[in-house]
Image (cartoon, coloured by chain):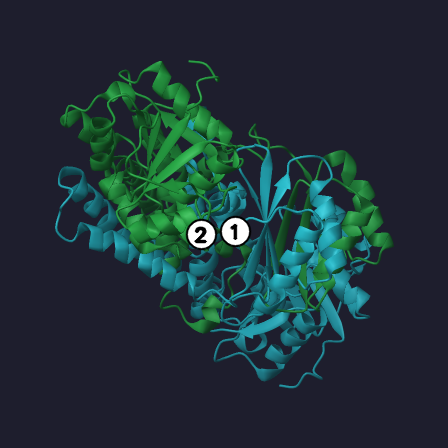
Chain colours: A green, B cyan
Amino acid sequence: MTEAAAPERVHIIGTGLIGTSLGLALTRAGESVTLEDLSTTNAALARDLGAGKTSVDVDPDLVVVATPPDVTAACVARALDRWPHAVVTDVASVKVAIIDALRLEGADLARFCGSHPMAGRERSGAVAGRHDLFHGRAWVLTPTVETSETAVALVRSVAATVGSAVVTLEPEEHDAAVASVSHVPQLVASLVAARLEHLADSSVALAGQGLRDVTRIAASDPHLWTQILSGNAHAVRDILAALATDLHAVIGALDALGSDQDALGARGTLARAIAAGNAGHARIPGKHGAAPTAYATVRVLIPDEPGQLGRLFADVGAIGTNIEEFHLDHGLGQAFGLAEIDVVPGAAAALAEGLEERGWRLHG
Amino acid sequence: MTEAAAPERVHIIGTGLIGTSLGLALTRAGESVTLEDLSTTNAALARDLGAGKTSVDVDPDLVVVATPPDVTAACVARALDRWPHAVVTDVASVKVAIIDALRLEGADLARFCGSHPMAGRERSGAVAGRHDLFHGRAWVLTPTVETSETAVALVRSVAATVGSAVVTLEPEEHDAAVASVSHVPQLVASLVAARLEHLADSSVALAGQGLRDVTRIAASDPHLWTQILSGNAHAVRDILAALATDLHAVIGALDALGSDQDALGARGTLARAIAAGNAGHARIPGKHGAAPTAYATVRVLIPDEPGQLGRLFADVGAIGTNIEEFHLDHGLGQAFGLAEIDVVPGAAAALAEGLEERGWRLHG
């Protein structure tokens, strides 16, 4: 397996958001790309956007199956048959079910290397395609024991060409990982948000930044997520079951406290649940992919008047501090917002001083 | 009840974060404030910071009990006895349990108006006190049928003086509301984060912005949250039980799909869970306290090099667009970050054009 093993001719089947974006990115990088879609209108649209040439009479080195997840396995099997010398990959967000289906069909798994570019948008279709969709995103490869080194090298090369960070995982490991870091958080955010549906306006008006953060992804598309969750049913189910066990322990503790505020062990259960959350939260990598960095935070009150946030941006830019994170917190639609600017600890004092000199009111 | 009914002499019992911040804010507003704390060192510290005079020999119009929640009811009862003409309020984040305890003691509820300033910090104690802690935050008043109009007016006046938005709710309504918008989201964020504790590094490395948002508040203090959850056990329990019912429906659907991908009704259950989340999420008020505003988003790729975010701020400031929201999204510690700038729809084109002119790469 060498980085030099780049494909010369890439054929993309399915010209939705991912297929079209990949075509745009590879074409821009000088690769020869052909496109195919069940809908010839879709394929022609992707072509007109610059994603490649439309053709079904091709002899590719690499075939990328970028169809909806429910037909991915069948399309991969057909591609392996149709081009007996080509390597085939797919881009679905769930991996084990596809490999199981291919194995059942007796497909040539040496030439198949499943993959998952962790990039998406809230819009779909060729028109939403972007050549930079994969920049700085993880692209997970999930080779099996059967997968040849050539197959892995070709897919790795494509992912690197479009600017992704290549990560290799076992298929089972991938599905369990995305269940933990993506599918379960999505479901739970939806379940928390669902509890707000019939809440009184006066109650929902008390929503703060915590609730906003927890439920932001609850705005996601039910149709897409039903496909994703169905395809990863086992892994998602196992984590949800463990979460349900923890949840029932908490409910039990609250029940006990509801009838007896001195209930033995109940407060311990609550404290352990929150403490376990601390420990898990600390595992999430920071901006630079390592352990979370301890930044210093400068908090600035933003009067809710036109142009204030723009003025803050101009002043922070003029001060010239390197900003690691920026977070905007709203109160109850009142006179002030709160901007949190994270910088490396050594830079906080200069930023705070510079902002105060420019008339900003700091907060904490 | 009139806005003119401002207290002339405010006595604050408990000089932690909230008590000290209130003393600082009221002193700054020209009110006469006295302070008292079980720990005379704490009280002296708050005094030295400018939060008021330390004295126990006082004749206040209004007493604010700002002690830890587990002793609030007892302190309120004592204050009502000690000053038979004063109005008394508290600042605890749970209200029904306090009123129940006072009623049981036969306290003079006409002079008590419970309240909850929805402000806090991740640090505690007098030293963390800020005169602007309550600016733009909701301050909920929870009068009962017994509460006199004078009592309500005095507490309302104090909340308004320190810059809060006053909201009046029934005590039960308050506790149910904070259970929904604060306590349940906190617990669920902790439960999701807890699932990461023993995950492999390679899996946790796939964490994206969705997971970061869902689990941000999972970093909260177990000791404080154990007190809060214990004090609101009934309301939190009821919502968690409803959430558990939804969760089990989802687990059941995933179980069914795990053994039969065509399981009747299973996909419908998943889709309904995500769709209910959509509906609940749409209830959360936007920045201006009304229904969520549909902003247009301009997405900008940020090279992960020193000074780039500062340069963006300077350019956005120079373009002069009024910014409604700003969100920074990180990939996997790779070459780019993604800034999302929300503006009113009419302003998006000018901002995008201005940024492209200044050499920024837009994204979608």
Q: Residue at x 69, y 44 (%)?
A: B309
Residue B231 in the image: above or below residue A103? below
- Front residue of A75/B25: it is A75
Tell me which corner region of the image, top left, top right, bottom left or bottom right, holds residue A80: top left
Is disc 1 placed on a helix, strand or loop? Answer: loop
Could you tell whether A152 is left or right of B331 in the image?
Answer: left
Amino acid type of the residue that numbered disc 2 sits on in the rendered structure: Ala
Q: Mark number for residue B364?
A: 1
Chain of the residue where label 1 is placed in the rendered structure: B
Chain of the residue where label 2 is placed in the rendered structure: A
Amino acid type of the residue that numbered disc 1 sits on in the rendered structure: Gly
Residue B154 in the image: above or below residue A336? below
> Circles 1 and 2: CB distance less than 8 Å?
yes
Q: Position of residue A22 (x, y in %)?
A: 43, 39
Name the residue carrying label 2: A128
* Total numbered labels placed on residues in the image: 2
Tell me which corner region of the image, top left, top right, bottom left or bottom right, holds residue B1: bottom right
Q: Is residue A208 visible?
A: yes
Could you tell whether B209 is left or right of A45 in the image?
Answer: right
Is disc 2 placed on a helix, strand or loop? Answer: helix
Q: Position of residue A344 (x, y in %)?
A: 72, 35
Q: Mark number for residue B176?
A: none
- Front residue of B81/A342: it is A342
Cα distance, mark 1 to mark 2? 7 Å
Could you tell whether A253 is left or right of B363 in the image?
Answer: left
Q: Position of residue B107 (x, y in %)?
A: 52, 71
Crowd around label 2: few <14 · some 14–19 · many ≥20 (10 Å):
some
